[in-house]
Image (cartoon, rainbow, N blue to C red):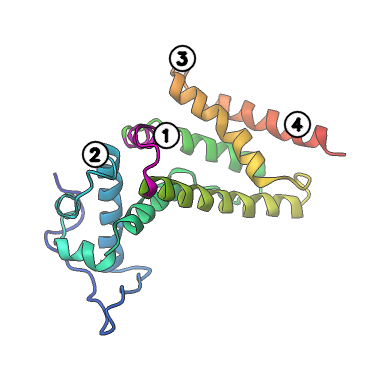
Amino acid sequence: MKIRGVPENVETAETTDAGTRPAARPGGRNARVRSQILAATTELVARNGVAGLRYEEIAELAGVNKNSVYRNWPDRAELVSDALLQYAEDSAPLRDSGNLRRDLVDFLMVFSERLSSSIGRALSQAAIASPGNTDLDEAVRVAYDQRLDTARRRFDSAVDKGEIPPVDSYFLTELLSGPVYLYINRRRHPFTREVAEKIVDVVLAGIHATTP
């Protein structure tokens, strides 16, 4: 199986004379190839776990030459970390439209969709099935830290605008995302926009009510 949209044996930029990794360009062929490699890595980690990850399989699934994978990510742990980081960013974008409630509801809806996808479920199961796997643990930690940093910036903006009082970003993120995990994992009821709105309303009301 090849990931569509990338021609066979597309090469990335060569390493520099000093042997360092080439810098990622914001656009162009190398950026597209890197994105396809990361997507293929995420799918294979979900399917086989980190221990079963092979560069040859990544290259085949991404539709690129194996050397392209090695040139961009000579370190497997860094490849896994970057792949899960991209997946996390795509899974839970927290925008700043100027309306915090709407942004949080949108965030929960996208988060629930990705969490309930086949890859999302497989990644969760891989993490649970591989306790103590340092590569996977570190990749998950980095991805979560990135998501938390994005949430912190959005909440800081809301505080500056007077939408919410000063708040612990980690605590607020856990309050919002925790119910989503329960809905998706228990599978008793569908996670709808109405549910997302109720979660956001309860959490925001609680923050305002408990602020001195």
How far, Cα to Cα, is label 1 from label 2?
18 Å
> Which mark, by number, is residue 46?
none
Does the magenta portion include 122? yes
Task: Tell me the residue that label 1 is attached to.
Answer: 115
Q: Secondary structure at mark 4?
A: helix
Q: Secondary structure at mark 3?
A: loop
Q: Residue 82: x, y in percent?
A: 37, 56
Q: Is residue 192 left or right of residue 132?
A: right
How far, Cα to Cα, is label 3 from label 2?
28 Å
| Sequence-earlier tag: 1 or 4 | 1
Task: Tell me the residue that label 2 is attached to.
Answer: 48
Residue at 54 percent across and 39 percent down: it is 106
Along the line of sight, the residue nearer the viewer: 105 or 59: 59
Name the residue type under label 1.
Leu
Name the residue type under label 2.
Asn
Image quarter (top left, top right, bottom left or bottom right) of the C terminus: top right
Q: Is residue 153 left or right of residue 108?
A: right
User: Eyeballing the image, is 196 above or below 57?
Assistant: above
Q: Which residues are magenta?
A: 119-134
Name the residue type under label 4.
Gly
| Sequence-earlier tag: 3 or 2 | 2
How crowded pointer 2 is (Cα within 10 Å; few <14, some 14-19, many 20+) is rated as some
Task: Tell me the residue that label 4 is attached to.
Answer: 206
Q: Main secondary structure of the magenta part?
A: helix
